[in-house]
Amino acid sequence: MFDILQAIPTWYLVGLFLASMVAFVISTISGGGGALLLIPVTSALIGTSAAPPVISLGNFISRLNSSWIQLLVGAFLIFIVFQYRFGKVEKSFNMPKLGFVPLGLITVFIRSYLFDHF
């Protein structure tokens, strides 16, 4: 699964994220249809074969209760310990230190938006 993410250029994923945010706003204002707006964008950015699973997964996650999402994230973090073999594997990829700045800004923006509005 993660091999497919490494094959996709980062700016495609950023573009998909921004298109998703625009589709979310339009869907919220109009009362639905955000997934239909993302089909051509997703197909153009990551390919037609990957578009249906990506959109289906996005729709599934958007209808989950927040307590289930917290449970899934907690289970993911616990299984990360097993993935890295209790600290025997140091890291899976190199991340430049400057890469944490935009990542932190995006994380803070998303968290503040979610906690302020929901």
Image (spheres, rainbow, N blue to C red):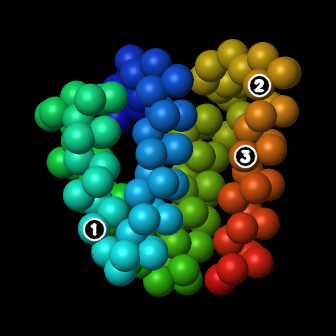
Residue at the image position 69 percent from the left and 16 percent from the top: 94
Q: Which of 62 and 1 is in front in this view?
A: 62
Question: Rounded to the nearest whole Å, what is the CA distance between mark 1 and mark 3?
Answer: 25 Å
Nearest to viewer (mark 3 / mark 2): 3
Nearest to viewer (mark 1 / mark 3): 1
- Which is nearer the N-term, disc 1 or disc 3? 1
Please determine whether, in this image, residue 65 is positioned above or below residue 69.
below
Q: What element carries label 2?
A: helix
Left or right: where 54 falls relative to 113: left
Residue 99's tag is 2
Left or right: where 17 falls relative to 59: right
Question: Disc 2 marks which amino acid?
Answer: Gly
Question: Disc 3 marks which amino acid?
Answer: Ile
- In what quadrant of the picture does the N terminus appear? top left
Rendered image quadrant of residue 60: bottom left
Q: Mark 1 points at which residue?
A: 33
Q: Nearer the viewer, residue 18 or 9?
A: 18
Q: What element carries label 3?
A: helix
Task: Mark 2 and mark 1 in contact? Answer it, CB < 8 Å.
Answer: no
Nearest to viewer (mark 2 / mark 1): 1
Residue at the image position 31 percent from the left and 74 percent from the top: 32
Q: Mark 3 points at which residue?
A: 106
- Which is nearer the N-term, disc 2 or disc 1? 1
Residue at the image position 48 percent from the left and 34 percent from the top: 15
Q: Is mark 1 on a helix, strand or loop?
A: loop
Please determine whether, in this image, residue 108 is positioned above or below residue 104.
below
Report x, y in % for residue 87.
72, 34
Report x, y in % for residue 46.
30, 29
Question: Disc 1 marks which amino acid?
Answer: Gly
- Which is nearer the N-term, disc 3 or disc 2? 2
